[in-house]
Structure formats: C-alpha cells, structure tokens
C-alpha cells in the first residue's frame, strides 16, 4: 500500500547549494564586505535575530521618504490642525531623523492634507508664508535638517480630489519628481493614519506606520500583545486594531519617525552588504 506523507514545508529563504554559515564567515572575515560589522545588530522588519523573516521588498535602497506632517514631524493638535504657528511643535527626534536622511543622500518631502484651508479656517498664504517656513527653520536650527518639496491638498473631504489622501496624487507627484516611478518600492510613505497607508498602497510605495499622533492607538494595541517594534503586519487579521483595510498591507510599524529612519537606513546598509557578499561568492 502507498503511504501518503505530507509534503515538506517550503524553504522560503533557502537557496540550493547555499551555506549560510560559510557565507557569514566569508562576509565578516578581515577585508570582507561586513568586516567589523555585527549582523545581529540589524533588527528591521526584514532582518532580525532569526535571519530574514520576510522577503525583502527591494534589492535597492529607498530613494525617497514621503512624510506626513502632523503626528509624524510635529505634534498633532487634532481638528482642525495647526492654524497658528505658535501651535507648531516638532516631535522629539524628528529633526535628527531628517538630518540622518540628508546625510545618507535620501530625498525627503512632505505630503500633507491641509483641509483647514479649504474650510476657510486657515489662509493658504499663512500656510505657505508662515507655518511651513517656520517648520523648515525649526528643523534646520535643531539639527541642520532640510526637506525638499512640501506637497499639500487643501480641498475639504466633501469635495472630490485626486491629490488629497487617501488618493495617491501627491505621492505620485513626489515620486515622479524624484525619479522613483519605475523603482520597485523606491519610495516609502511614513504616516500615522489609515489614509496615509491607503495613499501609499495606491501609489505603489512602501507603507510605514509610526506610533505617534493617531498611530498611538496601534502602538498601545501591539504593546498589549507584547509585540516588539519594528514589526510587520502582513494582513488584516493580524491588525490588533482592526482599523486598516486590506489594501494597507503589508505595513511596517515603527515607534517614531526616528526609529523608522534608523531601521530603514540599517536595512539599506545590509542590502548593499548582502549584494557585495553575493557578488564576491559568484565571481
């Protein structure tokens, strides 16, 4: 009689003929691409103590960071948002994070909904000539940080608009400006709301949710389940808040903008090092 046995589980990250131990030894040997590096220090959603936990989304480093403003760069003051420059206050480590991106040669832009303008609660001239210049000045004074374009949508929610998040218009403009349209996951959107993640998904950008601003609810829910950050939520059934639609996944969750930048830059460094290892082994 034929005995039926279950098929072996697929080795998701294993290549035929690939010896991880010898590759690691070769990489960290004197003169190797990871000489002096401690691989176990790379703890991102794609590389932790157990090795690669999910397939890396891209073989190239991120070229563009698109940042939501309220709740990511500055403190969220709730509806109707910052309408007075005196209410604009940077979040801790935000300026330092943007400076790190500047130093790494990664482009940075701001993508924000400012519907208070469309509702008549904030003159557009005040937004352009007072609030945003003040933001640039604060970032520069605190850490010497600078940002590129500031894209904003002003129409209220009851008026159709292909730029206001969750529509992808502003992200697509930014990606086109920085030459990321044809780069798989070359852009990452950092936000604190559902609409940020929806816009990123519709633009084909990586999704990074931070647990500041409106993202505090996600941080609290993950903490209750003893989930350490960063983490990746791959599908809606894994979302402890059950507040994000299916299109938002996979979604990476970080403690803050500073945490996100540190992890992604470390991930990019690992990706380049891994490519060097592969090239050295195939020569």
Image: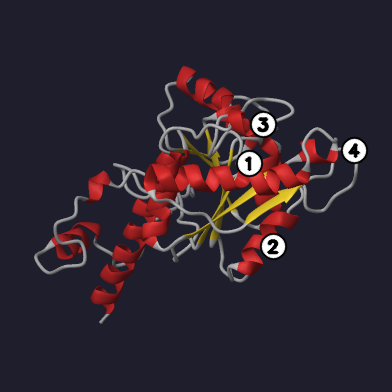
Farthest residue in the left direction? 30
Q: What x and y, as percent, mark residue 238? A: 57, 32
Separation of disc 1 and disc 4 at Cα? 25 Å
Label placed on residue 84? 3
**Label 1 residue SS:** helix
**Label 4 residue SS:** loop
Which residue, given by chain and number where applicable, does mark 4 sit on?
158
Q: Name which residue lies at 50% across and 35% down.
A: 90
Task: Tell me which label, 2 or 3, sits earlier in the chain.
Answer: 3
Task: Tell me which label, 1 or 4, sits earlier in the chain.
Answer: 1
Farthest residue in the right direction? 159
Up the image or down, 230 lies above or below 160; here it is above
**Do the residues under discs 2 and 3 have CB atoms within 8 angstroms?**
no
Q: What x and y, as percent, mark residue 241? A: 62, 24
Dividing the picture into quadrants, the one containing residue 218 is top right
**Label 2 residue SS:** helix
Task: Tell me which label, 1 or 3, sits earlier in the chain.
Answer: 3
Dividing the picture into quadrants, the one containing residue 196 is top right
Q: Residues within 10 Å of mark 1 (few under 14, many from 20)?
A: many
**Do the residues under discs 2 and 4 have CB atoms within 8 angstroms?**
no
Separation of disc 3 and disc 4 at Cα? 24 Å
Separation of disc 2 and disc 4 at Cα? 23 Å
Task: Tell me which label, 3 or 4, sits earlier in the chain.
Answer: 3
């Amino acid at each position: 009689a034929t005995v039926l046995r279950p098929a072996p589980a697929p080795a998701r990250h294993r290549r035929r003929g690939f010896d991880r131990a010898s590759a690691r030894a070769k990489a960290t040997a004197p003169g190797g691409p990871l000489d002096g590096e401690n691989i176990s220090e790379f703890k991102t959603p794609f590389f932790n103590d157990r090795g690669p936990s999910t397939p890396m989304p891209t073989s190239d480093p991120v070229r563009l960071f698109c940042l939501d403003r309220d709740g990511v760069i500055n403190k969220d003051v709730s509806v109707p948002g910052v309408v007075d420059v005196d209410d604009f206050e940077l979040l801790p480590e935000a300026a330092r994070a943007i400076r790190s991106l500047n130093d790494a040669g990664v482009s940075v832009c701001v993508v924000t909904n400012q519907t208070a303008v469309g509702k008549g609660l904030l003159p557009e001239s005040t937004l352009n000539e007072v609030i945003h210049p003040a933001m640039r000045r604060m970032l520069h004074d605190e850490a010497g940080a600078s940002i590129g374009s500031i894209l904003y949508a002003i129409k209220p929610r009851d008026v159709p608009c292909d730029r206001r998040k969750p529509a992808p218009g502003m992200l697509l403009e930014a990606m086109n400006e920085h030459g990321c349209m044809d780069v798989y996951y070359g852009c990452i959107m950092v936000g604190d709301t559902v609409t940020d993640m929806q816009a990123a998904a519709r633009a084909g950008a990586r999704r990074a949710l931070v647990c500041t601003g409106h993202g505090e609810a996600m941080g609290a829910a993950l903490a209750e389940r003893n989930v350490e950050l960063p983490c990746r939520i791959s599908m809606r059934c894994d979302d402890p808040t059950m507040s994000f639609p299916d299109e938002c996944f996979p979604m990476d969750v970080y403690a803050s903008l500073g945490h996100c930048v540190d992890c992604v830059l470390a991930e990019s460094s690992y990706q380049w090092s891994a490519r060097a290892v592969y090239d050295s082994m195939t020569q």
